[in-house]
Image (cartoon, rainbow, N blue to C red):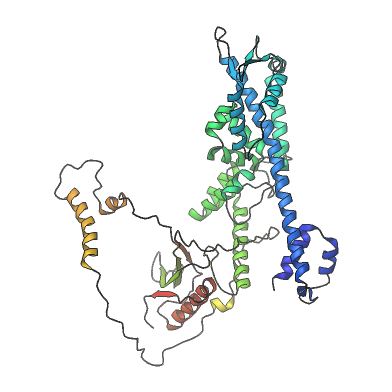
């Protein structure tokens, strides 16, 4: 039933007008297009080839920008080395070393297997620095200055620094206004550097670490460089409105860092004043934008629930061992008669990934960028409405098999670790700083024998009905079984409920 959406996506990607005209008539199932598997495979192959060509073109465009950046940094490095050298100690550079620095910088900029020809690199350096001369010493090529840095730096000295700053700001600002980035419901490490133009990121790196090639190789793009670049991108405006202190930010140029700051402060504090203060200083998105994204996430989650036919938090993975726990949740901050009190039921779901089986991640949520509501929609009625239930007779639980105790050797192994802690802190008056006095600190410093994965935990939407009700427990267990069956078909869920049925 998903073939209609898949073929529409392929037609839009390929801009196939003929196919789009056919699809505009109706659903592909109604047109019986699914009975043409050869055409369907050919369409998928065309889309895959088209996307591959697009990726190669993007990579080539990035490589074209990387070569001038690395070469300009190499010229700056040679110029600064000449300025720092003493007149009595002439500067002599080895072409092989400069070629190696050039290759390493290109690899750091993302160019795979850069094609650097030493002779061509030498010709480019001699062309851009006329006073630089090349001398052969056996198989090595040595570069040395005749008198001064060269005609390029002497020509550049005729212009003022303000003109250079204005030209650099104009070039970077042009790239910033053409860069598009929008929040897509998830934060990925790969999206951080892609949210800003490469020229802006490299300019910030040059300001913080230096403009020479060695400084760039040593430091690269740190977290502070990426964060500052994103804040500059967020606060860049095409037009400024006169007479206003706070300007309207464009959603098309909304980097992940500003969105993360707003959502993080909203999750931790729920304070409008703090978020608005950060927004006025250009460090975060506005409070209204936070509510809009929150509502979009809620809309996307509820839409995903309706599409899947089951309430399943998006963070959970498929094909992974899953357990659940049902318990009551009480929130009574003031008194028993307070209106803000809440006595309901909560369901926590846990998954336990391992190095052998990390589970299958589900598709990320899709946000509707045109939606501007600030209220999360209601959950499906099948989940919120609890049917009445009662016990007709006294329950008769099945007998439990006799439990076998573990071997004494395994118990003594754990007791040995406890005694090691007691030997360090037992009846000691002067304890060194390196000794962990508390039991938790002592065991936290111990090296773990095997690597482990952090468990995945998620909480399903709460119910207002109290947990000691038979109907609530029955309803909760039924929804947990549906969720576990959706994630792992055929698995029996392990449910821990403190209220007996």
Q: Is residue 434 above or below residue 492?
A: above
Quadrant of res 327: bottom left
Q: Residue furthest bottom?
A: 393
Write the residue at 23% across / 60% down. 413
Write the residue at 16% across / 50% down. 426
Residue 241: x %, y % from top left: 72, 41
Q: Is residue 473 above or below residue 230?
A: below
Considering depth in this image, is 369 or 90 the residue closer to the camera?
90
Residue 237 appears in the picture as rendered: no
Instruction: Answer left or right for 280 relative to 269.
Output: right
Considering depth in this image, is 382 or 287 the residue closer to the camera?
382
Q: Is residue 6 above or below residue 496?
A: above
Q: Residue furthest front?
A: 138
Q: Residue furthest left?
A: 427
Residue 385: x %, y % from top left: 54, 79
From the image, which quarter does the N terminus lie in?
A: bottom right
Q: Is residue 398 above or below residue 462?
A: below
Quadrant of res 278: top right
Residue 465 appears in the picture as rendered: yes
Instruction: Answer left or right for 472 relative to 21.
Output: left
């Amino acid at each position: 039933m998903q073939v209609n959406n898949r073929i529409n996506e392929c037609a839009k990607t390929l801009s196939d007008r003929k196919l789009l005209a056919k699809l505009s008539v109706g659903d592909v199932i109604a047109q019986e297009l699914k009975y043409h598997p050869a055409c369907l495979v050919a369409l998928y192959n065309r889309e895959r080839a088209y996307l591959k060509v697009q990726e190669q073109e993007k990579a080539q465009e990035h490589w074209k920008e990387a070569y001038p950046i690395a070469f300009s940094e190499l010229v700056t490095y040679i110029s600064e080395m000449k300025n720092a050298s003493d007149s009595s100690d002439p500067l002599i550079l080895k072409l092989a070393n400069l070629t190696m620095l050039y290759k390493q910088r290109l690899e750091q900029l993302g160019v795979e297997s850069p094609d650097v020809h030493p002779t061509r690199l030498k010709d480019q350096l001699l062309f851009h620095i006329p006073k630089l001369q090349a001398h052969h010493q056996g198989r090595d090529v040595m570069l040395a200055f005749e008198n001064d840095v060269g005609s390029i730096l002497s020509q550049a000295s005729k212009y003022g620094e303000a003109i250079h700053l204005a030209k650099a700001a104009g070039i970077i600002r042009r790239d910033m206004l053409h860069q598009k980035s929008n929040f897509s419901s998830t934060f990925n490490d790969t999206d951080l550097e892609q949210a800003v133009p490469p020229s802006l990121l490299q300019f910030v790196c040059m300001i913080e670490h230096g403009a020479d090639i060695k400084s760039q190789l040593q430091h690269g793009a740190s977290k502070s460089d990426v964060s500052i670049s994103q804040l500059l991108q967020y606060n860049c405006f095409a037009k400024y409105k006169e007479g206003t202190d706070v300007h309207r930010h464009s959603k098309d140029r909304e980097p992940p860092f500003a969105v993360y700051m707003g959502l993080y402060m909203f999750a931790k504090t729920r304070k409008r004043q703090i978020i608005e203060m950060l927004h006025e200083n250009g460090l975060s998105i506005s409070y209204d934008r936070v509510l809009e994204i929150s509502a979009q996430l809620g809309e996307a989650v509820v839409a995903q629930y309706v599409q899947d036919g089951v309430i399943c938090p998006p963070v959970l993975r498929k094909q992974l061992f899953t357990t659940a726990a049902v318990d009551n949740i009480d929130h009574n901050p003031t008194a028993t008669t307070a209106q803000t009190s809440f006595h309901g039921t909560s369901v926590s779901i846990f998954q336990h990934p391992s190095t052998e089986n990390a589970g299958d991640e589900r598709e990320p949520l899709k946000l509707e960028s045109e939606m501007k509501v600030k209220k999360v929609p209601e959950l499906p009625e099948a989940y919120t409405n609890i049917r009445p239930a009662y016990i007709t007779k006294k329950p008769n639980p099945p007998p439990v098999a006799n439990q076998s105790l573990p071997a004494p050797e395994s118990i003594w192994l754990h007791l040995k670790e406890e005694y090691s802690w007691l030997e360090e802190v037992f009846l000691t008056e002067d304890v060194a700083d390196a000794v962990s006095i508390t039991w938790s600190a002592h065991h936290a410093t111990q090296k773990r024998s095997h690597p482990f994965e952090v468990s995945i935990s998620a909480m399903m939407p709460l119910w207002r009905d109290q947990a000691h009700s038979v109907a609530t427990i029955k309803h909760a267990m039924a929804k947990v079984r549906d969720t576990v069956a959706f994630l792992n078909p055929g698995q029996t869920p392990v449910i821990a409920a403190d209220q007996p049925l």
